[in-house]
Image (cartoon, grey):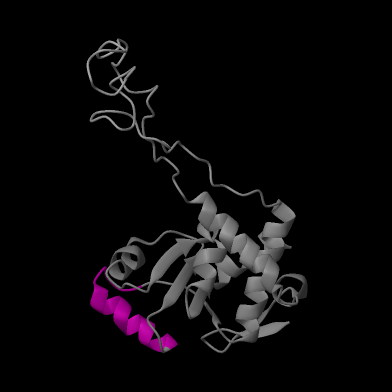
Amino acid sequence: MKIKNLDGKTLELNDSVFGVEYNESLVHQAVVAYMAGQRAGTKSQKSRSDVRGGGSKPWRQKGTGRARAGTTRGPIWRKGGVTFAARNRNFSQKLNKKMYRAAMRSIFSELVRSNSLVVVETLDVADFKTRSMVEELKKFDTDNVLLVSDVESENVEFSSRNIPACEVVQVSALSPVNLVAHEKVVVTSAAMGKIGEWLS
């Protein structure tokens, strides 16, 4: 498979990576699993057994005219425990490496077919001002862009951070979520080589 970069040069792509059939169910599974893995799951509350105090019976069982009570730390008491207390949870879902890579290949292939993947030689701006990045993004007819590079660039990082729909990542930080969340994916030629090696 061949694709032309922004400068008009033809780039040869691996058909086994960028020319596979789109598998919607697998992509959905990969996106859900990735987003589930990002959840902290650190919500925690105290049940009646976790709350300090309440060891002695507040008043005797009979003869007071009040309802019987064995502890002051029950759910109906002020400063008592929570009835169904939340606990730390692990929301991560298991997804095999082969399935994950197959989902990524499917996404990249669909990006190529829909002309949403743009290849550039280098990705850089003259300074770290937002205005410079806005001018650069005009080449792609949208500011909803994912910029993928093989090396870190402070100018690109700083100039894009105030553009809400623009995201900058390196190849190692690519995920199915950020790939499907943007209208255009702009990748440098060196980064395309790394992606091809990773997914082949």
In the visual, does 20 lie left or right of 123?
right
| Residue at x 29%, y 69% (from the top left corner) | 159
Residue nearer the viewer, 44 or 29: 44
Across and down, in percent, residue 182 comes to 47, 76
Question: How many numbered marks are there?
Answer: 0
How far across and down, in percent of the image, does residue 14 sit?
73, 73
The residue at 36%/34% (across/down) is: 82
Could you tell me if residue 104 is visible in this image? no
Tell me the residue at 55%/83% (across/down). Answer: 116
Q: Which residues are magenta?
A: 125-140
Q: Toward which corner of the image does residue 126 lie, by quadrant?
A: bottom left
Q: Position of residue 53 (x, y in %)?
A: 28, 16
**Residue 170 sits above or below residue 46 on the image:** below
Q: Is residue 198 left or right of residue 172?
A: right
The image quadrant of residue 135 is: bottom left
Q: Is residue 27 visible?
A: yes
**Front one among 53 and 62:** 62
Instruction: Check the image and report above or below for 31 versus 70.
Output: below
Quadrant in which the N terminus is drawn:
bottom right
Q: Quadrant of the C terminus?
A: bottom right
User: Residue 70 placed where, x, y %?
Assistant: 34, 17
Magenta-drawn stretch contains 139? yes
Asked if residue 148 is among those painted magenta in the image, a careful observer would answer no
Q: Residue at x 69, y 66 (%)?
A: 26
Query: Compared to 36, does 45 lie above or below?
Result: above
Residue 59: image quadrant is top left
Principal SS element in the magenta part? helix
